[in-house]
Image (cartoon, rainbow, N blue to C red):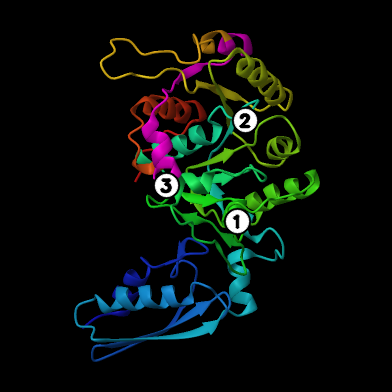
């Protein structure tokens, strides 16, 4: 005969998608009753309007129903009492999401100008870290020119919100993504906001989103050194910044401005990546430097940061990113870059 301990062990594998912790740990399971193969229990939700209610009930029913000897599962629902909810979030009425999050490392990706592949590097960094087994999220801080959802989703789902905060969307490999474009009715809807509104949106993406437990959060910054980048550096506890440039001299000059900003804000510079460095032509013995010779080592030396590596121009990556398949791109050139970034920030635990 199944025991209450077995029921609770099974339910400990069911997570609240909003809080990203299991329902037993959260104190959501009550009144477990077992009688001749029939198991009933009460699931206490943070609110009866929880957008994940049906999913949680189904997952709980399947978990208990899989136990030997169980042929019927009854899940009753109720809302948490104020005292029960207080055990999870304390007395806070604001910033509840931030109190529930455990983000161990935060890496910003920055460039001085647009068009150098900053969002691509941010996406590839997240993908590479995820392939290493880490729990990873991507915060798209480019409010007026967001690119991240297009890289990860062919048909982006909309984030759902609950009483604790907004829940990021999971990619196909489990990368948690939040971007203003996921909240707009159409991806080409213009966000015509002044600086204070942009700054507030970024702060909300950090403090009002249920990121849960993450080994690394990658923040994709907009180009330049204006309000958005300043807000991130002032309000989010960054471990460091990865700078992105391209071979053109102009890009190098502007990326040095961005590096100076990070240094003035006392944010560590983790290194420099050069994108669009070369193209490998079929049948050619040597790569062709389409935009001229690389200045990356020189720029890295001037700024005083490590040179992390060069990325090629590859038509496949453009094709795959256009249809939300960045996670399927091999990106062998990027693996050592991601490992070096992880080593620099101390992301050295053995992934589960």
The residue under the point 67% across, 44% down is 144
Q: Is residue 141 magenta?
A: no
- The quarter of the picture where residue 223 lies is top right
Q: Which mark is residue 130?
A: none
Quadrant containing the N terminus is bottom left
Please count the marks in the image: 3
Relative to the observer, which residue lies in front, 139 or 2?
139
Q: Is residue 198 visible?
A: yes
Q: Is residue 305 magenta?
A: yes
Q: Which mark is residue 114?
A: 2
Q: x, y (%) of residue 297?
A: 52, 10
Relative to the observer, which residue lies in front, 180 or 269?
180
Q: Is residue 133 visible?
A: no
Q: x, y (%) of residue 218?
A: 53, 39
Element at badge 2?
loop
Q: Which residue is mark 3?
A: 323
């Amino acid at each position: 005969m199944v025991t209450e301990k077995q029921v609770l062990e099974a339910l400990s594998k069911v997570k609240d998608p909003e809080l990203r912790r299991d329902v037993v740990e959260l104190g959501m399971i009550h009144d477990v009753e077992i009688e001749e193969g029939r198991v009933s229990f009460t699931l206490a939700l943070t609110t009866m309007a929880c957008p994940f209610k049906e999913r949680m009930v189904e997952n709980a029913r399947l978990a208990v129903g899989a136990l030997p000897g169980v042929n019927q599962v009854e899940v009753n629902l109720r809302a948490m009492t104020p005292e029960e909810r207080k055990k999870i979030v304390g007395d806070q009425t604001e910033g509840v999401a931030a109190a529930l999050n455990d983000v161990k490392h935060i890496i910003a990706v920055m460039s001085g100008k647009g068009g150098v592949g900053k969002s691509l590097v941010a996406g590839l960094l997240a993908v590479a870290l995820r392939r290493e087994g880490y729990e990873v999220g991507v915060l798209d801080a480019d409010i007026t020119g967001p690119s991240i959802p297009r890289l990860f989703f062919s048909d982006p789902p909309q984030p759902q919100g609950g009483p604790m905060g907004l829940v990021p969307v999971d990619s196909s490999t489990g990368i948690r993504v939040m971007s203003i474009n996921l909240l707009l009715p159409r991806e080409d809807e213009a966000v015509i906001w002044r600086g204070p509104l942009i700054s507030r949106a970024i702060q909300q993406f950090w403090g009002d989103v249920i990121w849960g437990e993450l080994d690394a959060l990658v923040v994709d910054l907009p180009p330049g050194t204006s309000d958005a980048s300043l807000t991130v550096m002032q309000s989010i506890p960054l471990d460091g910044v990865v700078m992105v440039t391209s071979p053109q001299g102009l890009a190098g000059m502007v990326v040095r401005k961005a590096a100076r900003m990070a240094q003035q804000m006392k944010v560590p510079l983790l290194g420099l990546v050069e994108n669009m460095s070369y193209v490998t032509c079929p049948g050619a013995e040597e790569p062709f430097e389409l935009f001229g010779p690389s200045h990356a080592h020189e720029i890295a030396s001037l700024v005083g940061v490590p040179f992390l590596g060069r990325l090629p121009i590859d038509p496949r990556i453009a094709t795959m990113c256009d249809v939300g398949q960045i996670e399927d791109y091999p990106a062998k050139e990027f693996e050592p870059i991601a490992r070096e970034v992880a080593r620099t920030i101390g992301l050295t635990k053995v992934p589960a």
